[in-house]
């Protein structure tokens, strides 16, 4: 079974631009979560989607948004990029939203904002 | 609020020896899950092992075992017979119903020949 895929793997943008990252979950998984990882803040939760609905949102400004499609694929968008948005963005999928469900991560998208 | 604490920023271990990575957590929930992930320098988070709060036996997966002490709220990862390829960051994480996975700060493990 194919794992979680994320595209693109690397991205370089300039301040003020916007970016869209894509995540395809493991086949059959209905939940997708997004995390931002930086050296200073560690792993921070962005959002969580299940059946096309955002179920949970982390403490990020409104410039960060996401959505999930009917095939469970998910995208996240960051508008008006700032230097501090440079990070590794990780997507994870799980079967459902249960406490016992393991989240499987993709390889990440490394975003650099210049 | 739930909190995951990994007190060892960095650890060294010699190849073929066992190593324990510490993790303590704080929650008042009865039902929760504890996970360990490995993150090599490539960046991908690799799932290693899971322990449910109601599981009475410690979880094991190959060379990985989780030393779960519920009363002490600790979930230490034990890696037996370390290999050079085990050098990576290791993250402890907790899941709770209705909440996202919460991660600790991580422990950097270096396996030396």
Image (spheres, coloured by chain):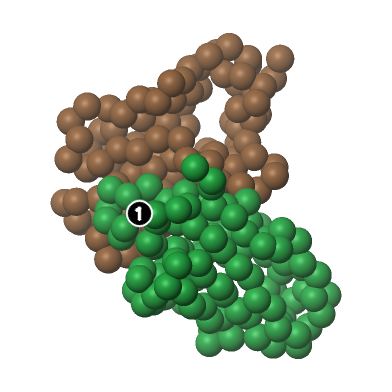
Chain colours: A green, B brown
**Marked residue chain, label 1:** A
Q: Residue at x 44, y 66 (%)?
A: A72
Residue A100: image location, x then y, percent: 28, 48
**Residue B39 relative to residue A10: left or right:** left
Q: Residue at x 69, y 78 (%)?
A: A19
Q: Callout 1: few (<14), some (14-19), or many (20+) C-alpha neighbours within 10 Å?
A: some
In the picture shown, does residue A108 fall above or below B33? below
Q: Residue at x 80, y 76 (%)?
A: A13
Q: Nearer the viewer, residue B50 or B15?
A: B50
Residue A26 is at least partly visible in this image: yes
Query: Residue A18's image quarter?
Result: bottom right
Q: Nearer the viewer, residue A114 or B17?
A: A114
> Mark 1 falls on what kind of element?
loop
Residue B108: image location, x then y, percent: 61, 38
For the C terminus of chain B, the quadrant is top right
Query: Residue B23's image quarter?
Result: top left
Residue A40: image location, x then y, percent: 63, 61
- The residue at which mark 1 appears reads as A95
Q: How many marks?
A: 1
Q: Residue at x 59, y 42 (%)?
A: B39
In the picture shown, does residue A73 fall above or below A43? below
**Residue B80 relative to residue B44: left or right:** left
In the picture shown, does residue B64 fall above or below B15? below
For the N terminus of chain B, the quadrant is bottom left
Q: Residue furthest top?
A: B16
Residue B26 is at least partly visible in this image: no
């Amino acid at each position: 079974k194919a794992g979680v895929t994320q595209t693109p793997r690397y991205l370089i943008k300039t301040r003020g631009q916007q970016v869209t990252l894509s995540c395809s979950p493991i086949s059959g998984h209905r939940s997708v979560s997004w995390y931002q990882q930086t050296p200073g803040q560690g792993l921070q939760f962005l959002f969580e989607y299940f059946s096309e609905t955002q179920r949970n949102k982390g403490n990020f400004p409104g410039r960060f948004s996401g959505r999930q499609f009917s095939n469970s694929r998910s995208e996240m968008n960051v508008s008006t990029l700032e230097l501090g948005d440079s990070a590794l963005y990780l997507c994870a999928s799980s079967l459902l939203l249960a406490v016992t469900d393991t989240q499987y991560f993709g390889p990440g998208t490394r975003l650099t904002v210049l | 609020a739930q909190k995951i604490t990994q007190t060892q920023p960095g650890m060294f271990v010699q190849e073929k020896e066992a190593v324990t990575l510490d993790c303590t957590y704080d929650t008042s929930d009865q039902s929760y899950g504890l996970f360990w992930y490995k993150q090599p320098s490539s960046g991908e988070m690799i799932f290693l092992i899971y322990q449910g709060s109601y599981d009475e036996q410690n979880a094991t997966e190959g060379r990985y075992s989780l030393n779960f002490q519920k009363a002490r709220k600790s979930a230490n990862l034990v890696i037996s017979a370390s290999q050079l390829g085990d050098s990576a960051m290791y993250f402890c994480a907790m899941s709770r119903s209705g909440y996202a996975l919460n991660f600790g700060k991580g422990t950097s493990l270096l396996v030396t020949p």
